[in-house]
Amino acid sequence: MQLRAARLQVVGFGPAALGIPIAADRTGLLDDLMREGCVFLDRRGRNEWRSLDYDIPSNSAAGDFLEGLSPDGRLRAVLRSPEVRALQEAPDQPVALRVAARFLARTAREIADYTVRFDGAHTHFSTSVDHLSRDADGLFHSRDARGRTLALSRSAVIAVGARPLAGAAPRTVTSEAVLRRECDAQCEAAVGAGTTIRILGGSHSAFSTVGLLLREWGDLLRPGQIQVQARSEILVYRPEARAAVTDGRTGAVAVGGTADVGGTALVTAVSETRPLHRFAGLRGESEALYRAVLHGAEPRVRLLCHPEENDPAASPLTIAATGYRARRLPVLDVRGQPLFPPGEAAVDEEGRVLDGRGRPVPGLFGIGLGHCSPVGPASGDSGYPMAAVNVFHGRTADRIVAQL
Ligand SMILES: Cc1cc2nc3c(=O)[nH]c(=O)nc-3n(C[C@H](O)[C@H](O)[C@H](O)COP(=O)(O)OP(=O)(O)OC[C@H]3O[C@@H](n4cnc5c(N)ncnc54)[C@H](O)[C@@H]3O)c2cc1C
């Protein structure tokens, strides 16, 4: 069958990708976009949803997950779903991430069902894109591993997310797998045997993992049995950064204002000079736990500030919370050459993907977890700016939709 060129294709249909139809709906452009052709492609099955399916509290406020949806828009039915009531109960407080994940999965289904109403709009599940290429016809072709075109479009959005960095050492699991409750047997065995559980990293994922271990097996843990080994200073999120975003100011913070608490540097975000990384910095329960550990109120957890303190032989279970890397989606030019090293798509403030020389690739955008910032890594131990659902569904998506 002859494929029709769509106005847009979005590779990946996770939380960030949903921002594109959500923003179009907010501005009354959703039907135009669908009529002119809009294709979503995701390798997961229609009823599979793994994004944010972690057994921990969210690091953002419950209301953030609802922020982008217009109560008068075409997608408003999703605001009547049972998950919404749970998110609205205490909109300023964290919520179980699994509730937020169920809400996002429902929103994805609503959008997929909406595309069915339009000839040019489709949502393809169980469809893995091997690469995107800009062909001589000036269109973006998403292709499978056998080189067959899956969709073609005038513009494209990369929204394939990121994957956790795995530790190289034996007996290492990722915090991602622990938070998804895929490693309960290993954790239980280590706790029961009284052996050390070492967490690599000092991020929200690291302290969320500690929180989960304490919640599930806390009664059995001996003092110091959990060791947190952070490579860099541990950051604490400051609510002023949120105010900077909602005021429409630069939304940028820099690391500074170091306070020494209990011998460990407690670093807070204070000025406005670098792109805000909402995901950098502990907040909520993770922050409270970190402070308890610092002040000696949580003896089951020890912070290892110096690598020499670490004895791998004494650490039969290591949990790597060492950050995320962009998933690889090669983008090829008309000669079949990669436009940038795969897995290193840099996205500027306007959501435009930059080529290897830092120039925007016309018609190509990126949204979601894993993209590098052209100005270099944001503060903290990861370099992915603005990694939060309300930002994806808000200003990032608005800027992309305005350019389509
Ligand atoms: C532990 C943890 C906790 C977090 N907590 C919060 C929070 O509380 N609040 C918040 O706002 N944010 C949070 N985030 C950050 C962020 O919002 C989430 O990580 C979110 O899932 C990112 O969405 P995404 O769409 O970019 O990526 P993903 O969720 O990874 O989705 C990417 C999609 O692309 C698909 N895909 C990948 N490759 C291909 C391909 N080649 N072809 C086709 N499809 C493909 C995948 O199947 C997937 O469906 C958290 C992140 C982590 C890791």
Image (tube, helix red, strand yellow):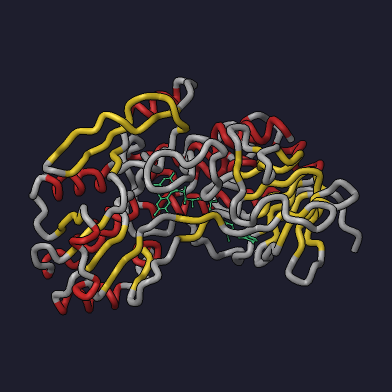
Q: Locate the C terminus and report the quarter of the image it occupies.
A: top right
The foreground one among 317 and 39 is 317
Q: Is residue 63 left or right of residue 150?
A: left
Residue shown at the point (10%, 45%) measured from the top left: 295
Q: Position of residue 359 (x, y in %)?
A: 70, 37
Q: Is residue 128 above or below residue 388?
A: below
The foreground one among 109 and 156 is 156
Residue shown at the point (21%, 55%) measured from the top left: 306
Which quadrant would residue 193 be assigned to in this image? bottom left
Q: Residue furthest front?
A: 308
The foreground one among 202 and 169 is 169
Q: Is residue 185 above or below residue 239?
A: below
Q: Is residue 116 left or right of residue 250?
A: right
Which quadrant would residue 164 be assigned to in this image? bottom left
Q: Position of residue 83 (x, y in %)?
A: 43, 49
Which quadrant would residue 220 be assigned to in this image? bottom left
Question: How many numbered callouts?
Answer: 0
Q: Is residue 187 above or below residue 38?
A: below
Q: Position of residue 210 (x, y in %)?
A: 24, 58
Q: Position of residue 1 (x, y in %)?
A: 90, 64
Residue shown at the point (44%, 33%) measured from the top left: 276
